[in-house]
Image: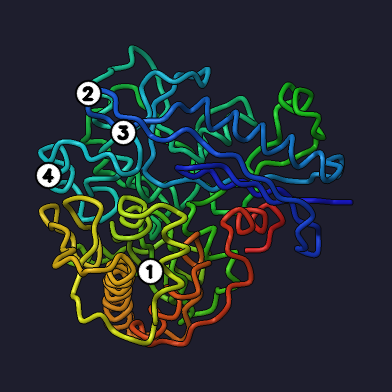
Amino acid sequence: MDSFLGLDIGTSGVRAILISDTDQILASSNTALPGSFSQEGRLSQQPEDWWQAVLDCLQQLSSQQDLAGLQAIAIDGTSGTTLLTDPQNKPVSPVLMYNDVRPAELVKELCRKTSTVPACSRTSALAKAVWLFQNYTPAGKYFIQQQADWVLSQFTDSPGISDWNNGLNLGFDPETLTWPDWLTEIDIGKGAFPRISPPGKPVAYISPRIARQLGLPESTRLHAGTTDSIAAFLASGAGQPGEAVTSLGSTLVLKLCTQKSIHSNTHGIYSHRLDQQRWLAGGASNTGGAVLKANFTLDELLSLSEQINPDRRTGLNYYPLPSKGERFPFPDPEKLPVMYPVPDTRSEYLQAIFEGIARIEKQGYDLLEELTNEPVLSVRSSGSGAHNPVWSRIRQRIVDRPFLQAKQKQAAYGSALLAAGRL
């Protein structure tokens, strides 16, 4: 049976979904990753752990489904998680995680050269690449890679391939589909930017060495991938102008399908190109699951949610953040969390955080409607937070738009669709 594999490389784990040529799920697997660690003030992970987790997922899949019919693989990853590698694909720098914030002066310098929100933000892959070059200074040629790029390169034995969506964080211009001239003004030595392809386009065949090692067909294609939030959008079944998806992961990410590209530095809004006719406009707030994880255990989230009446308002006006700093719906590196006064019960405290995150979501969609002149016709949800019915009910009450059930809630399914050519 022909099959197509989607891999979702996240911060906490790797997820894999295998689908048929009729888009039915044939098998799925997941493997946890070691948590990010602090090293000399950096937030980092070991890229070898990503690859080992991929291998573990493939082993799980092969126990459920024969992979002899595997046709193609596509990979999504956390945009902004960045490292430098040599031409043999060996890391020559540590990994800087998506939420690792580099010195403000460096970002100010980048912002003087470009008005592109993702490229000059404090968490951009470009800012991280420049910082890594300045601090580790590879002697010869090297490649700038983000998380999904590096994992793809493990399958091909060759670095230097990325996609429109991850490329945006490095400064790629999705309007002209080129690397802009202002990038030549930035000193990165002999660093090479990746070759950029549309999401879902076949870009290489699996390395014969890796195919033999993993027991996969040597005819397996690698297709250009995307970011985790866009893969989640594709998995949801949304795709027409006016359809939106909220990703409730460690952060809160909003995407609205539009017919035009919009950018607003004032609000931290930017647009990913989906194809020649469609764009995904949106932004990423620092609020989200990371705030919940910092204040509640998983067992508490489940038990306390059952004690909440989602139709009763707490009256508390929180702005939940895991730490100082916000990106969307307004960029403010000095924005402090507002999570007080603390109520008498833990369940009310949880509800107030749920409500605060939902108000940020509403503010985001209000802005997107205003800037695109397109109404938000529906909202689908993805990510771990989408599985909490109480939180969903609170969000639906506050966001005040039609909520629809997502076709699938796993980003890996969206990547599998890219592998199958279903953009």
Q: Earlier in the sequence, mark 4 or mark 2?
A: 4
- Quick one: label 3, few (<14), some, or many (20+) residues within 10 Å? some
102 or 187: nearer the eye? Answer: 102
Q: Give me the C-alpha separation between circle 1 and circle 4.
A: 24 Å
Residue corresponding to mark 1: 281
Residue 80 position, x and y percent, is 36, 43
Query: Callout 3: helix, strand or loop?
Result: strand
Q: CA distance from mark 4 to mark 2?
A: 16 Å
Q: Position of residue 93 (x, y in %)?
A: 36, 21
Please state which amino acid type lies under the numbered disc 2: Gln
Depth check, mark 4 against mark 3: the one in front is 3
Give the mark nearest the N terminus, 1 or 4.
4
| Residue at (70% x, 27% y) in the render | 207
Per the image, label 4 sits on a secondary structure element best described as: helix
In this rendered view, identify the residue nearer to me: 95 or 400. 400
Q: Farthest residue toward the right? A: 1
Say which residue appears at 18% left-offset and 43% top-offset.
Answer: 110
Q: Amino acid under label 3?
A: Leu
Of the two numbered discs 1 and 2 on the same chain, state the one appearing first in sequence: 2
Q: Please give the residue where the numbered disc 4 appears in the rendered image.
A: 108
Q: Report x, y in % for residue 139.
A: 33, 12
